């Protein structure tokens, strides 16, 4: 958990999901079937690859991979639940040990100016929470390495963690400064004013992510230099979609030095909008498949999912902040003295607010995931429609590549409906493959919904 971003987690979950790597089976991070395309004999021949891939009728894995995928799925479910419980325990321990009051006292002794106090308090509380959370991060990376999904050395992993801490500290300073400024100015309506202030912060974060944050963790190079043929095919798809992403905004990303997983995505907006293709994806998928991937992502823009996601998540955040406002008074009246918290206006109340926000967003998680699955399903449909006519038998292409993705990423072949409802922010890969195989309005003389 990054303390600086917990307030914004619900927005990021919806609006940045397609831009962050993960596996479509967990609740803790955005997922991607951005690799959903596949290969039939014709498309493989077009891509210069051997036409040996069999037709796909359902998501299947070889017996050994199937067993491994199911085992990993159980491990990930336990890890998700442990992360939740452990995160709550950390917040309770920070409150019980009165660490926030101690940091507040240090800050108040150093300066009488509020902003300077925040410059001392915010990094201390952010680093404390993140360092205490480090064991779960180490365990999750160890699991990824054991199952062959991560090839990143521990030195590199800890260096990425350190860079993440820099972002966390800066974000926490900004969030704490704004939060306690509005609490001080309006004790009764702080929840509303902080909500208003959080929205432009998230929009700014989404804008700068591809320009500043992503290059801190991965190497990016112009796609045109790495793969001119793929760039040309992506340009065709972009024009077919009626969008404007020139070759200068198409990038190759060096993911292979850290992961074996596949991904491609469209990220940013305005001047920061771009198409990004991982090197692992280029190595394992054909050009038509990658075009389908980009078509799926293009659907998020064409169908205004970013705007819709922001509106949906903004409403969720407004409700979350209001419920927190209604509960924080009771919480501090009941335990505030034991925790060394003077009042809500006290910087030491920050972990108590985080505790409430974590509980509320966890309870509301299935609602956010349901909405996310809905827009991801629409993007799948758009990807099939926008590549129809560009890629021979685009449905079979999507199904076969979905199977490749599941094999590479060890996706659960048969997740329970309850688990999908609670934790999946994308439809299960098996369901996405079935949709790709059966969505064919053209053969019925019907008009597609999105791409006419």
Image: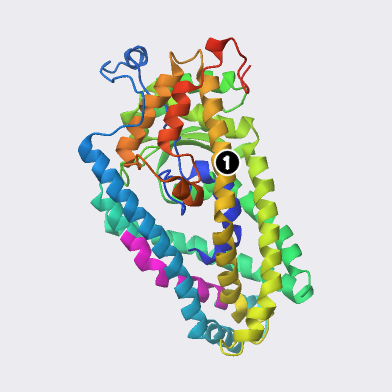
In-image side of 37 versus 191 (left or right): left
**Residue at x 71% of width, y 72% of height:** 326
From this view, report whether residue 11 is shown above or below residue 323: above
Element under disc 1: loop
Residue 385 point in image, percent of width and height: 55, 21
Label 1 sits on residue? 268
The colour scheme of the drawn protein is: rainbow
Q: Looking at this view, is 451 or 69 the one in front?
A: 69
Figure quadrant of residue 267: top right
Q: Looking at this view, is 268 or 367 the one in front?
A: 367
Residue 338 point in image, percent of width and height: 57, 90
In-image side of 170 versus 286 (left or right): right
From this view, report whether residue 224 is shown above or below residue 370: above
Callout 1 environment at 10 Å: few (<14), some (14 to 19), or many (20+)? many
**Residue at x 33% of width, y 31% of height:** 404
**Residue at x 67% of width, y 41% of height:** 307
Residue 140 point in image, percent of width and height: 34, 58
Residue 339 magenta-highlighted: no
Residue 123 magenta-highlighted: yes
The stretch of residues the image draws in magenta is 121-139
In-image side of 74 versus 273 (left or right): left
Q: Looking at this view, is 298 or 432 the one in front?
A: 432
For residue 262, say whether it is visible.
Answer: yes
Figure quadrant of residue 354: bottom right
Quadrant in the picture for the C terminus: top right
For residue 247, say whether it is visible.
Answer: no
Figure quadrant of residue 433: top left
Residue 77 point in image, percent of width and height: 38, 55
């Amino acid at each position: 958990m990054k303390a600086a971003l917990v307030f914004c987690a619900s927005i990021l979950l919806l609006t940045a999901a397609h831009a962050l790597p993960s596996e479509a089976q967990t609740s803790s991070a955005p997922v991607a079937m951005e690799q959903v395309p596949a290969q039939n004999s014709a498309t493989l021949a077009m891509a210069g690859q051997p036409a040996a891939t069999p037709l796909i009728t359902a998501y299947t894995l070889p017996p050994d991979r199937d067993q491994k995928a199911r085992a990993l799925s159980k491990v990930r479910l336990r890890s998700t639940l442990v992360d939740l419980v452990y995160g709550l325990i950390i917040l309770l321990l920070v409150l019980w040990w009165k660490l926030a009051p101690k940091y507040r006292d240090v800050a108040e002794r150093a300066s009488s100016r509020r902003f300077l106090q925040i410059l001392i308090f915010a990094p201390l509380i952010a680093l404390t929470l993140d360092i205490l959370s480090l064991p779960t991060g180490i365990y999750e990376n160890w699991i990824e390495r054991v199952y062959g999904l991560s090839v990143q050395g521990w030195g590199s992993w800890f260096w990425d963690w350190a860079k993440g801490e820099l972002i966390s500290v800066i974000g926490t300073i900004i969030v704490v400064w704004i939060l306690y400024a509005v609490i001080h100015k309006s004790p009764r309506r702080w929840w509303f004013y902080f909500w208003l202030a959080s929205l432009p912060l998230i929009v700014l974060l989404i804008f700068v992510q591809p320009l500043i944050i992503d290059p801190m963790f991965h190497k990016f190079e112009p796609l045109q230099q790495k793969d001119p043929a793929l760039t040309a095919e992506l340009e065709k798809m972009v024009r077919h979609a009626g969008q404007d992403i020139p070759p200068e905004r198409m990038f190759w990303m060096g993911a292979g030095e850290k992961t074996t997983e596949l991904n491609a995505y469209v990220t940013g907006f305005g001047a920061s909008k771009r198409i990004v293709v991982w090197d692992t994806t280029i190595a394992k998928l054909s050009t038509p498949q990658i075009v389908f991937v980009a078509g799926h992502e293009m659907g998020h823009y064409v169908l205004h999912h970013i705007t819709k996601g922001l509106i949906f998540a903004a409403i969720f955040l407004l409700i979350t902040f209001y419920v927190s406002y209604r509960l924080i008074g009771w919480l501090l009246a009941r335990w505030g003295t034991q925790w060394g918290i003077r009042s809500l206006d006290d910087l030491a109340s920050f972990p108590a607010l985080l505790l409430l926000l974590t509980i509320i967003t966890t309870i509301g998680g299935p609602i956010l995931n349901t909405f996310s699955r809905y827009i991801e399903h629409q993007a799948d449909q758009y990807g099939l429609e926008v590549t129809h006519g560009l890629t021979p038998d685009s449905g079979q292409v999507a199904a076969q590549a979905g199977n490749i993705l599941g094999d590479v990423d060890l996706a659960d072949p048969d997740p329970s409906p309850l688990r999908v409802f609670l934790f999946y922010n994308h439809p299960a890969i098996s369901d996405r493959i079935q949709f790709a195989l059966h969505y064919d309005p053209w053969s019925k003389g019907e008009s597609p919904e999105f791409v006419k």
